[in-house]
Image (cartoon, rainbow, N blue to C red):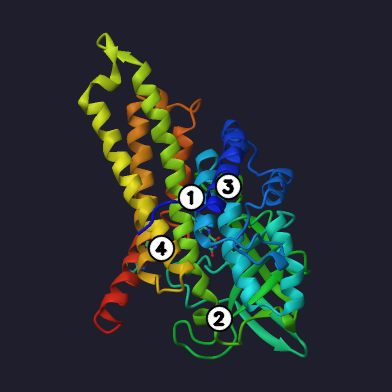
Amino acid sequence: MDFALTPTQVEFRDRARAVAEKLAPDYQARERAGRIDPELRREIGGAGLIAPELPVALGGQGVDRLTSGIIAEEIGRGDINVAYLQVVGSLVGQIVAANAAPTVAAHWVPQICSGDEIVGIGLTEPHAGSDAGMPKLTAVRDGDDWVLNGSKSLSFGRDAAAVVVFARTGPSPRRGKDISAFLVPLDLPGVTREPAPDMGTKAVGRGLAHLTDVRIPGDHLLGEQGRGFTQVMQGFDFSRALIGLQCLGCAQQTVDETWQYVSTREAFDRPLSTNQGVAFPLAEAETLLAAARLLCYRTLWLKDTGQPHTTEAAMCKWWAPKVAYDVVGQCLLLHGQFGYRTELPVEQRLRDVLGLQIGDGTAQIMKLIISRQKLGRELAP
Ligand SMILES: Cc1cc2nc3c(=O)[nH]c(=O)nc-3n(C[C@H](O)[C@H](O)[C@H](O)COP(=O)(O)OP(=O)(O)OC[C@H]3O[C@@H](n4cnc5c(N)ncnc54)[C@H](O)[C@@H]3O)c2cc1C
């Protein structure tokens, strides 16, 4: 067993860390602006930090998935919302690269990697998030085209230039059957957008895309017709580990700052840190973050080495965001009233990291996946 990072991993980590240090001072300003500046997006893409595991021929860097995770973690230290660019870019980029017609992939994937455009993922709908295998969005063949009707939720709902959606393309009433994936450019007639009034993640600009008789070319089908759920959804295992690391980076930064704060603020004539009741929760936080990080790294290593990792990915997705949320909440309390105030970034981090206990599937759904992997569908809840 070798825990050392390779020279390439170290190089990308340092590059992402330098970007994160530049991002951190404007984390709160980005929330106030409610957006991530497209120039910043291009800068991060230009540094090779969006979907870097994709092949060089499609604009990626050809690195391993562990490197992608390390980048998500590092950028998450500076701004958890900006890290969505890398996480969504990796998820969608690999879906499009693996399943789109070559001309469609050649058009979109390089633009994802460069940060020129965002392509969102529209799996859930207002009526069905956990039950994503029962979409109401329909896609009907009309000549050479597909015509889509329905609504999808997506991160980057305001800024995405296109979205990968999962739509019903047949009559089967069974969950996950007759579902196909499509790439839908969002500048087409019939597309309207509705912002989500979220409590956090405001810089990401989540929202809904409503599609009314939206007509897309036949070659925008991804993978095989009717197999979208089983074939195209395989990419989600990868992004679950990335989300875990995105959250852990945010929490680690908060712990680092909190050690500093409790060493310098005094109560009862001595630094706060000299109380076990202050230092020990931080020691516990370090332990939890180290354990959750190893779980995420190992999951990405399993992916990189072609081994099954669905169970581990679901573990990453339910546990790491929860650990991160609990740790950030503990750090907020250790800042006293200043943690509760909006001058410091801690309260925003708490709101932002909370969203990722829901986005991409809740803890209950992840535990359902783990149970099914262990027991089989018949015996699992
Ligand atoms: C920050 C953020 C980003 C997001 N980004 C995207 C995106 O990019 N693309 C996208 O498609 N969607 C996105 N979503 C939507 C997200 O994936 C869904 O909100 C999530 O899957 C939960 O679905 P729901 O909100 O419909 O809740 P429901 O499915 O209505 O669930 C409500 C509650 O019931 C529980 N529950 C449901 N079924 C079961 C069960 N069988 N057993 C036990 N408990 C159950 C759930 O765990 C949850 O606690 C995002 C959401 C957030 C908050």
Instruction: Give residue 317's quadrant in the image.
Output: bottom left
Q: Position of residue 183 (x, y in %)?
A: 67, 73
Q: Position of residue 376 (x, y in %)?
A: 29, 82
C-beta proximity under 8 Å, tags 2 and 3: no
As measured in the structure, the alpha-carbon distance from the residue carrying label 2 to the one carrying label 3 is: 36 Å
Task: Return the mark for residue 246.
Answer: 1
Above or below residue 95? Residue 39 is: above
In this rendering, the label closer to the viewer, 4 or 1: 4
What residue sits right under mark 2 in the picture?
Answer: 228
Instruction: Give residue 140's quadrant in the image.
Output: bottom right
| Residue type indicated by callout 1 | Gln
336 vs 79, nearest the viewer:
79
| Residue type indicated by callout 4 | Thr
What residue sits right under mark 3 in the picture?
Answer: 11
Q: Position of residue 22 (x, y in %)?
A: 62, 34
Mark 3 vs mark 4: which is more N-terminal?
A: 3
Q: Position of residue 223 (x, y in %)?
A: 61, 82
Mark 1 vs mark 2: which is more N-terminal?
A: 2
In this rendering, the label closer to the viewer, 1 or 3: 3
User: SS class of the residue under badge 1?
Assistant: helix
Mark 4 vs mark 1: which is more N-terminal?
A: 1
As measured in the structure, the alpha-carbon distance from the residue carrying label 1 to the one carrying label 3 is: 18 Å
C-beta proximity under 8 Å, tags 3 and 4: no
Task: Name the quarter showing ligand 1.
Answer: bottom left
283 vs 335, nearest the viewer:
283
What residue sits right under mark 4 in the picture?
Answer: 299
| Residue type indicated by callout 2 | Gly
Instruction: Give residue 206's quadrant in the image.
Output: bottom right
